[in-house]
Amino acid sequence: MTASMPAPVVLTGDVVRLEPLSLDHVPDLFLAGGGDEEVWRWLPAPAPRTEDELAVLTKGLIDDPDHVPHAVVLKETGRATGWTCYVDTPGYAESIEIGWTWYGRAVWRSAVNTECKVLLIDHAFDKLGVNRVVLKTDILNTRSQAAIRRIGGVAEGVLRRQRRRRDGTWRDTAYFSILDDEWPAHRARLTGLPR
């Protein structure tokens, strides 16, 4: 388990800036993915139909002590295009999860996800001192699984019937991890920069 959840910080890359999620991000976030069923398909909440609905979700995430949410802000525009979180990991020593992540479709298949993960994983290993980063997804979400594998996530297994999906069916959850001693090689491959 994470000893204590990290304080929100700003993490800056070439393409994105991750900053503490706030209600000020809601208008941009709604433009990026509000009401888009495909963006919200695998998330634990339905696609928000209004900015007010998205504000309620945002406030709930900000207030949840088991999550440290970051707005994903495109440096080129200064607009938020999604969010991503550090998540507590009960039962796992010196570990942290990266999850509850979504991006507007306009940035799918771009450098955004890779850079977000590099920033968060670097910070987790270098500043938070964890030894393991956890990533998980619905077993049916093959796009997410491919992205996790591409950044270096190693499949650990599947928790069968781990929780109910919004439609009432059972979700099997695919678990992945990256260990601190594995990360430098993956980071070099992803960024072209040695560590």
Image (spheres, rainbow, N blue to C red):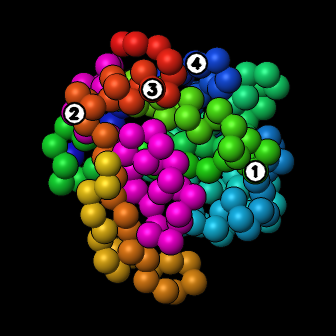
> Residue at coordinates 46% horizontally, 48% vertically from top-left?
148
In the picture of the structure, the residue carrying the numbered disc 2 is 131
Residue 105: mark in rendering: 1
- The three-letter amino acid code for the residue at tag 4 is Thr
The one nearer the camera, 84 or 15, is: 15
**Image coords of residue 96 (percent x, y):** 31, 41
**Image coords of residue 75 (percent x, y):** 73, 22
- How far apart marks 1 and 2 lie (CA) works out to 32 Å
Residue 65 appearing in the image: no
Residue 151 sits in which quadrant?
A: top left
Q: Which mark sits nearer the N-terminus, 3 or 1?
A: 1
- The three-letter amino acid code for the residue at tag 1 is Arg
Q: Which mark sits nearer the N-terminus, 1 or 2?
A: 1
- The three-letter amino acid code for the residue at tag 2 is Asn
Residue 190 appearing in the image: yes
> Residue at coordinates 44% horizontally, 69% vertically from top-left?
139
Residue 81 sits in which quadrant?
A: top right
Start and end of the magenta stretch?
Answer: 125-153
